[in-house]
Amino acid sequence: MMSDLWPPVVGICGWKDSGKTTLIETLIPRLLERGLRVGVVKHDAHGLEVDRPGKDTDRYYQAGAEVAAHDEHQRFTRTHLRVLADLDALVSRLGETCNLVLVEGHKASPIPKLWLIGEDEVEPPDDIEHLIGTVRPGARTVDEVLDTVLSQVEAFHKRLAVYAGVLIGGASTRMGRPKALLPWHGRTLLEHTVDVVRPWVERVVLLGTGPTAETLAEMPVLADAVGVEGPMAGLLAAMRWAPRVRWLILPCDLPHLTNQSVQWLLGQFHPGRHAVMPVLPERANPEPLGAFYDPPARLPLERAAVQDRFSLRRALPEEVVAGPSVTPDLAPAWQNVNTVEDWHRLTGEVR
């Protein structure tokens, strides 16, 4: 079903004059209050009148061009490409910046939908599929409809696949040897990281071209994104490879990473946020590693990379990043090792 792709979709369907537009207009500000970024796809069987005949943009379109017009407040596109008329393509386009799409109409599309009962109706038509509820005049409040939509968002995120990307591409210049291969309780640090995170995700991928343990030779490895520096190179490689999943991004040098810390992190999902970057005790800035990223994070990351801005923390606007506070008992999980001194301090290893 198309609704299994990003972002979650809810259809608002009904016959003409059943109140679809009014309901959507009422829902939008309520959803925005919840921190969601909402897109709307409108389908009108009677045809749209957004570009009147005779106007310059219509004349360009009729001549065969693809048309884009904008001012400082709005933009409009009109294209001859038939693929953009497909609902999944429209939803995908909105998903670059939105994390919920309301669809007005499209009653035959395979998406979860609410049916607005008209004055002359008793029940929805028999051929309406993927129905998640009905809205009868005066019988359901907007709050109840809002709860239904939010439950669909929550159910969608519970189904969303989570992959882990473990960064192995660092040069380890300050350590003097590859951090991924440092010994830790009879195995390497990289093996430790993979073993801890594997039960919590559907797939683990190594990011970068650094050395790996022999036991992990069969794991998928993605080279860093070309022209991108630092951890952003690994994250963008991951998001380009699998753009419709949530990515848990970890460095390979977290000796005290635990099941409890991974479970806690994955439980910090916040509707409307593109990323979750934990905030450690006595630190002001959120941690961009040991963090997870939802699909909409990719667009601002790509834009930052084009501008040679490679800080994950600065690439995403603050309002789209959740920064939950890590409790003191879990905080050691985010302590990485960069130098020989770090290694001795964290492990007690004698020089």
Image (cartoon, rainbow, N blue to C red):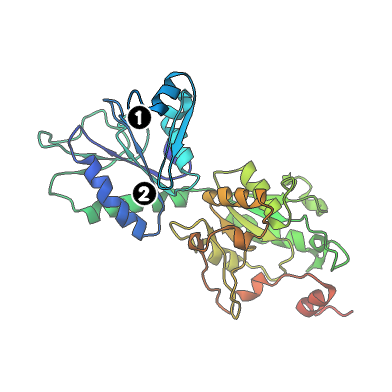
The kind of residue tagged 2 is Gln
The answer to whether residue 101 is seen in the rendering is: yes
**Which residue corresponds to mark 1?**
51
Residue plotted at (80% across, 80% down): 348
Q: Quadrant of the C terminus?
A: bottom right
Front residue of 126/104: it is 104
Instruction: Give the image location of residue 86, x and y in percent.
Output: 43, 29
Above or below, comparing residue 284 to residue 249 in the picture: below
Q: Name the residue under label 2.
A: 152
The front one of 64 and 216 is 64
In the rendered structure, find residue 326 and report the number of the disc placed on it.
none
Please name whichever residue, 82 or 62, is drawn nearer the observer in this view of the structure. 62
Element type where label 2 sits in the image: helix
Residue 184, image x, y percentages: 79, 68
Tell which tag, 1 or 2, sits nearer the viewer: 1
Q: Position of residue 239 (x, y in %)?
A: 62, 47
| Dot placed on the residue nearer the N-terminal end, 1 or 2 | 1
Q: In this view, does 12 lie to the left or right of 176?
A: left
